Amino acid sequence: MGETQPGPWRMMDLPRIQDARGNLTSIEAQQVVPFEIKRVYYLYDVPGGGSRGGHAHKQLEQLIIAASGSFDVVVDNGRKKETFSLNRSYFGLYMPPMTWRELENFSSGSVCLVLASRHYEEEDYHRDYYDFLADVRGGR
Ligand code: TYD
């Protein structure tokens, strides 16, 4: 692995500037997020009750935010599985590499904002759960 070991998955409180006109969350690179942000993408127009994900990344670190609405994230590292409900714009779920994730139960109109440590690389994906498990268990 690299010089800095990524920590475990965790919910992070993001800075919140409350205002009667509407709230604001600002994410400063290298201050709030524990990696250098190389890419930002967002999921939207997901049908209510819908699901996404169903893969893991070999090296990518991500911070997932429900910028609007809500959805559940089931994270699994091959040893432990946990479900987080993301339903506030000031929570971020940090996911280290080698985390299988399922995003489920999207509320209609929700927006899933993702900050990512690497550019898009299809080679970084594990899309087969059994290949992922074999990799986690040192198979290859
Ligand atoms: P995928 O990561 O499988 O989506 P999700 O995890 O949300 O279900 O990506 C869906 C498609 O979009 C796939 O063909 C790859 C492409 N894609 C990009 O081109 N760039 C990106 O940054 C991402 C995240 C996906």
Image (cartoon, grey):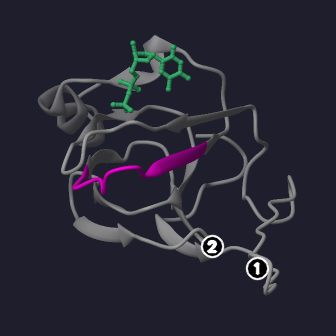
Give the crowd class for mark 2: few <14, some 14-19, many >=20 residues within 10 Å. many
**Quarter of the figure that contains the C terminus:** top left
Q: Residue furthest left?
A: 130
Can you give x and y, in whole percent of width and height, for residue 21 in the image? 80, 78
> Does the magenta-highlighted stretch encompass residue 106?
yes
Q: Which residue is mark 1?
A: 16
Nearest to the observer: residue 128 or residue 92: 92
Can you give x and y, in whole percent of width and height, for residue 119 in the image? 66, 22
Magenta region, residue range = 104-114
Give the crowd class for mark 1: few <14, some 14-19, many >=20 residues within 10 Å. some
* Mark 1 and mark 2 residues within 8 Å of each other at the beta carbon: yes
Q: Is residue 20 above or below residue 66?
A: below
Q: Residue at x 22, y 56 (%)?
A: 105
What secondary structure is marked by label 1? loop
The tally of labels here is 2
Left or right of 130 on screen, residue 105: right
Can you give x and y, in whole percent of width and height, for residue 123 in the image? 45, 12
Alpha carbon distance from label 1 to label 2: 6 Å
Q: Residue at x 63, y 73 (%)?
A: 90
Q: Which residue is mark 2?
A: 90
Disc 2 marks a residue whose amino acid type is: Tyr
